Amino acid sequence: VIITMDSYYVGYFDSDEPHFLESCSLCRKTLDLNSDIFMYRGDMAFCSQECRQEQIESDESKAKSWRKSRSSLRKQSDTKDSVAGKTVRTETLVMA
């Protein structure tokens, strides 16, 4: 049995999911075996530095948005726990 590099990536383990080195994670362009592949987070392959950078910026934006929404939820929770400007304890105390 002769296995070429072309056949190694195509249909990797007969899975419906394409191998991560088969196409760009952002634009889905086919990655050539004789071209540079730009990696991000270990398992995301990109056809160019531009595609990789776009993904990095998108991830950073999502993380920033997530932190902001989490912070605002925490502030809303803090105001719900106060009555007339005084903090009300809402924890549960278990004694044995």
Image (spheres, rainbow, N blue to C red):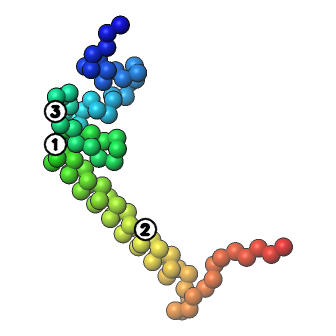
Residue 37: assigned label: none
- Disc 3 packing (10 Å; few <14; some 14–19; many ≥20): few
Residue 70: assigned label: 2
Q: Name the residue under label 3.
A: 35
Q: Mark 3 or mark 1, which is nearer the start of the sequence?
A: 3
SS for callout 2: helix
Closer to viewer: mark 1 or mark 3: 3
Q: Nearer the viewer, residue 56 or 38?
A: 38
**Residue 10 visible within the image:** no
Q: Where is residue 85 in the image (x, y as percent from the top left)?
A: 52, 92
- Disc 2 packing (10 Å; few <14; some 14–19; many ≥20): few
Q: Position of residue 92 (x, y in %)?
A: 70, 74
In the picture, measured across the screen, residue 13 lies left or right of residue 40, that is right
Q: Which of 62 and 39 is in front in this view?
A: 39
**Alpha carbon distance from label 3 to label 2:** 41 Å
**Alpha carbon distance from label 2 to label 1:** 33 Å
Q: Name the residue under label 1.
A: 48
Tell me what residue is drawn at x 22 percent, y 47 percent.
52
